[in-house]
Amino acid sequence: MAGHNELGKKGEQLAVNFLMKNGYDIIERNYRFDKAEVDIIAQIKDTLAIVEVKTRSTIDFGNPQDFVKPKQIKNLVKAVDEYVIVNELDVEVRFDIIAIVKNGKQFEIEHLEDAFYHF
């Protein structure tokens, strides 16, 4: 497996651990619909948090959250709309980004709630 894939998987697991430690229930991981993959669907109280995880080994080329592109956001929104309808959920939906940067042997985790809006 390529190094960036391993880093991505490690980042997703760190994000799951972070969310659970902060009171979230993990509902789905790597949910796919059409052209989108939702990294994590988590719930806290009556809010469904759709979490895009971005992990980088360095910020030399920008912050991890800067790599979420408008087309990806559009696909995520479409996938989540489908998920909510199919599962007949009555919840608030929020789109978050968890940005993770490797810093030596440590990882810095930043949770950006409401990182982008429905459009």
Image (spheres, grey):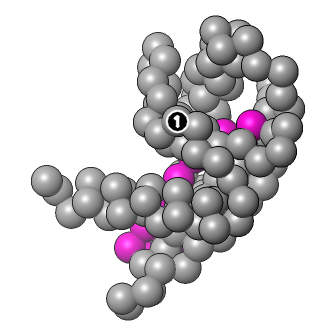
Against 96, residue 94 (above or below) is above
- State the image coordinates of residue 66 (x, y, percent, origin top left): 60, 56
Verify whether residue 35 appears in magenta: no
Q: How would you rate the neighbour count of disc 1 (Cα within 10 Å): few for under 14, some for 14-19, many for 20 or more? A: some
**Residue at (27, 54) in percent of width and height:** 5
| Secondary structure at numbered mark 1 | strand
Residue 104, image quadrant: bottom left
Quadrant assignment for the C terminus: top right
- State the image coordinates of residue 115 (x, y, percent, origin top left): 75, 50
Q: Residue furthest toward the bottom?
A: 104
Residue in front for this viewpoint, 114 or 40: 40
**Residue segment shown in magenta:** 48-59
- State the image coordinates of residue 60 (x, y, percent, origin top left): 46, 76
Tag count in the figure?
Answer: 1
Q: Residue furthest toward the left?
A: 1
Side (left or right) of 56 relative to 79: left
| Residue 63 seen in the current view | no
Amino acid type at circle 1 is Glu
**Residue at (43, 78) in percent of width and height:** 102
Against 79, residue 112 (above or below) is below
Q: Would you name the residue on which mark 1 appears?
A: 28
Side (left or right) of 70 relative to 37: right
Residue 93, image quadrant: top right
**Residue at (64, 48) in percent of width and height:** 25
Against 28, residue 9 (above or below) is below
Verify whether residue 55 appears in magenta: yes
**Residue at (70, 65) in percent of width and height:** 22
| Residue 35 seen in the current view | yes
* Magenta segment, prevailing SS (helix, strand or loop): strand
